[in-house]
Image: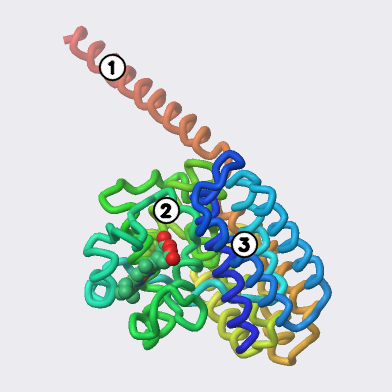
Amino acid sequence: MENDRLAARASNLLSYIAVDYGDSVDDDRILDTDLYRLQQHHATQALELVRQLPDKPGRSALESSIGALQEAIGRRDDADAVRRRANEIADRLAALYQMQRSPTQSLPAANLAAPLFQQRCARCHGSWGQGGGAVPDLRDATRMASFSLYDLYNTLDPTVDTVHSNRVDGDLDSRQRWALAVTAAALAVKNQLPPSADLAERYPALVGLPGMAVTRPVELPTDARNALMWWRGHPHLVRSLEHPLARAEGLLLLAETDYRGGDNAGAYHKLMLAYREGYQPLQQSIELRDRVLYRQLQAQWKKLRREVISAAPNTDVIASIQNLRTLLARARARLEPMPGSSISYLWATLLFVLALALGLSLWWGLRWRKRSRL
Ligand code: HEC
């Protein structure tokens, strides 16, 4: 547990560097000396935290990359480069220490925690998140795009982030923090129209977990960035856009993180959820479309379940999960309407219309002949 805390704290500091560094340096020049020093301090602290984590292959490389980040800050590199570096380090840290950066259950609607926001947060952040003075504007889309939902969630845990006192959010549970993170994320997209539905097909990972929770919009192409900003502020409306099989794939990723971290019970729970909520609703359709693939999937689910129950070695379970995710992705592609099917519909319609026209003209001809005979 303690290690999770250290890693979350380091991730929190890195996210602040990613977000704030750009306000402290511009074009080689220091704009705000205090803010600049704070970034240097954050980097030093992040390095110290990582050094307290258990040693394992990959940790020394992680330390060197934080060293490189410190040098980049020292050189006053440009903001985008420093931001990308800090975010990459946070992602590597998460992978190395199996950080669970996403909730398992779906995220609630933004208005669920709205009363809590008014009660606890509005006195500093304002009723609409407008802030003022030392309090940042939560509606600032550029700034908010630099935070993932997980980064926001982290600011609400006083054992991870000291921005808020224990009195503000010390008693909240993890569900409430995720709900508040959504409420905060929604402020930046208030009154904006939803992105077009085809974007959900283009970026399936962003409409589900963990993608929606761990991705920082700023690192995405513009259309995906704007879409993610909106989606994560309206998770309850996005749920219907998420393909069940993509949900299964996302849950399997979470299960893998649990298993790598030694939490077999957590992994088993997520595996079952992936099966029940993601795979089962489409099981029959897959069987009808592709029997061979269906049999492979059935066998792979069974194999993985057995491995998790018998606490098989990490490498076996990880290989099985990856195998299963590949099969699920293939099933997802198989369930899509066949390419060209719209063309055959077109032909069928055309033939139907032709046949109808032929029939009508024959009937008309017959009638006309009858009448002329009269
Ligand atoms: C006592 C005043 C106060 C209260 C109450 C408060 N905050 Fe904050 N919050 C701040 C300040 C000040 C910062 C900025 C700290 C910094 O950037 O150094 C901040 C930062 C944040 C951030 C990070 C955003 C950013 O741009 O840096 C989020 C998200 C946030 N608060 C959400 C909340 C939520 C949700 C609540 C209610 C549970 C809350 N805050 C209650 C003062 C407060």
Q: Furthest-right residue in view?
A: 57
Q: Residue at x 22, y 64 (%)?
A: 127
Q: Which mark is residue 40?
A: 3
Q: Say if mark 2 contacts mark 1, CB within 8 Å.
A: no
Residue 100 in percent (x, y) is at: 58, 76
Residue 358 in percent (x, y) is at: 38, 21
Q: Say if mark 1 contacts mark 3, CB within 8 Å.
A: no
Q: CA distance from mark 1 to mark 3?
A: 93 Å
> Is 239 positioned to the left or the right of 14 in the image?
left
Q: Earlier in the sequence, mark 2 or mark 1?
A: 2
Q: Residue at x 81, y 70 (%)?
A: 60
Residue 57 in percent (x, y) is at: 83, 74
Foreground of the two, 6 or 20: 20
> Is 211 positioned to the left or the right of 263 in the image?
left
| Amino acid identity at mark 3 | Gln
Q: Nearer the viewer, mark 1 or mark 3?
A: 3
Label 2 CB less than 8 angstroms from ligand 1: no
Q: Earlier in the sequence, mark 1 or mark 3?
A: 3
Height in image: 340 above or below 111?
Answer: above
Q: Residue at x 50, y 65 (%)?
A: 213
| Amino acid identity at mark 1 | Leu
Q: Which residue is mark 1?
A: 366
Foreground of the two, 137 or 191: 137
Element type at marker 2?
helix
Q: Which residue is mark 2?
A: 229
